[in-house]
Image (spheres, rainbow, N blue to C red):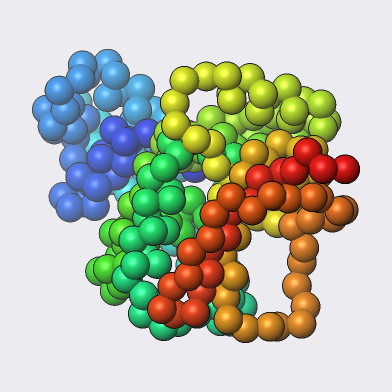
Amino acid sequence: MDMFVALSDPTRRAILEILAIYGELSATDIYERFSVSPQAVSQHLKVLREAQLVVMEKRAQKHLYRLNPQTLSQFEEWVQQTRQRWEERFEALDWMSQTSDQELNDDLVAFFQGFDQGFIGYPTASGMIPNWLHAAQNPSASKEERAIARAVNTLHPFILSHPEEKLAWDNTELLVVKSDQDLIEAVQKIKQQPGRALGVPSGIRTAQTFVRLGLIDEHVLMVHPVAIGNGKSVFTKRVNLDLVGAKTYKSGVMRVCYQPSSRS
């Protein structure tokens, strides 16, 4: 059993939290702390044992459970490494405006609240989702960062991947797309479903693919008051656009909205 799949269930996470507090508990003691049936809790304990997150020891007639410190230390190391990689990515974005701008922050929160589903490539999701989940509860994060994180975390992400992957996060859905046509058909099908707008809060490769395949109905670009002279382009070929909106902020950032143009 994959450790991340085991951790994806809230009941199993609650069991780990209880064992972290009490150290060691019998199966009966654990059952009594949940409203679901003992059989259901027993299945959750089995999954945690198979993932080596807990160990079970028989003493007389009791089955005693405790955390497996070795596996948890490996998980903690993975979290730290992932967080470090994302911190390095954010440091690479030091060209972005650092001027306090409450109006800009409020508009970013409203922007993410404007769509309830989004497409994210699996490699980006494996770092981005844990990062935003952590940021939303991190007391050392700024109030503005936590507000954006909470807005992002309400999305239902469609995780794009070529192979089958086991997702370790709640409220996520895997889309296996092995070709451009698979992606086009999947996106068109989801566009027909009821709901708010769809977003692509993903990495550069997913964004490039969506633009190349003509799947973007509106481009929202944040222009910062700095020229860095290099970087990766979202547009890999010429795309004619029509300006449909623009707004400037006191920090010098400008938000511009474009839609694909019918002009050849």
Q: How many dots with numbers?
A: 0
Q: Is residue 246 above or below residue 102?
A: above
Horizontal side of 49 relative to 27 (left or right) equals right
Task: Give the percent coordinates (x, y) of residue 37.
Answer: 21, 16
Task: Give the percent coordinates (x, y) of residue 93.
Answer: 58, 76
In front of the other: 110 or 8: 110
Residue 153 in view in this figure: no
Task: Give the percent coordinates (x, y) of residue 94.
Answer: 56, 81
Q: Which quadrant holds residue 166?
A: top right
Q: Is residue 226 above or below residue 68?
A: below
Q: Is residue 228 above or below residue 209?
A: below
Horizontal side of 240 relative to 103 (left or right) equals right
In front of the other: 167 or 191: 191
Q: Residue at x 69, y 49 (%)?
A: 242
In front of the other: 114 or 12: 114
Q: Residue at x 71, y 36 (%)?
A: 215
Task: Give the percent coordinates (x, y) of residue 51.
Answer: 48, 39
Q: Residue at x 54, y 54 (%)?
A: 245
Q: Which quadrant holds residue 259?
A: top right
Which quadrant would the C terminus be assigned to in this image?
Answer: top right
Q: Residue at x 70, y 56 (%)?
A: 204
Residue 114 in view in this figure: yes
Horizontal side of 188 relative to 50 (left or right) equals right
